Image (cartoon, rainbow, N blue to C red):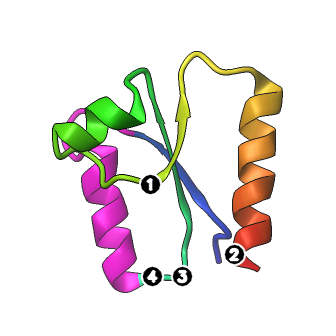
Amino acid sequence: HFDMVITDVIMPGMGGGELGRRLAKSHPELPVLYSSGYTDDMLSSQGILQPGVNLVVKPFERETLLRKIREILDASS
């Protein structure tokens, strides 16, 4: 059992966006947090991610990541 998946957006082979779409089909309740050096606007305008997904932009502080994880887990419970 997983409470959340954290993945980078741009990866060799299957990107994080595709991973998230596949997970949503089989586990729609599983939250996904994406990480990228690109902004949300750029990723959504290129069709890589849908607007409004959970995203932390690199570089980020550890506290930023922890805060975002807590926010997502609290919202999903």
* Residue 7 locus on image (x, y percent): 47, 45
The answer to whether residue 24 is magenta is: yes
Is residue 44 depicted above or below 70 in this figure?
A: above
Whether residues under marks 2 and 3 lie with C-beta atoms below 8 angstroms apart, the answer is yes
- Residue tagged by mark 1? 52
**Would you place residue 40 above or below residue 16 in this image?**
above
Of badges 1 and 4, the one in the foreground is: 1
Instruction: Give the CA distance from mark 4 to mark 3.
Output: 5 Å
| Residue 55 visible, this orientation | yes
The image position of residue 61, as x and y in percent, is 74, 20
Kindly identify the residue that appears in the image at 36 percent across and 61 percent down. Answer: 20
Q: Residues within 10 Å of mark 4 (few under 14, many from 20)?
A: few
Q: Amino acid at mark 1?
A: Gly
Q: Name the residue that disc number 3 marks.
A: 29
Observer-side mark, 2 or 1, equals 1
Provide the residue designation for mark 4.
27
Dot 2 corresponds to which residue?
76
Q: What's drawn in magenta, residue-wise?
A: 9-26
Q: Amino acid at mark 2?
A: Ser
Residue 27 falls in image quadrant: bottom left
Amino acid type indicated by mark 4: His
Q: Earlier in the sequence, mark 1 or mark 4?
A: 4
> What quarter of the picture does the C terminus occupy?
bottom right
**In the image: residue 76, left or right of residue 56:** right
**Given the image, on which type of amino acid does mark 3 rest?**
Glu
Residue shown at 37% from the left, 75% from the top: 24
For mark 3, give the secondary structure.
loop
Give the mark nearest the N terminus, 3 or 1.
3
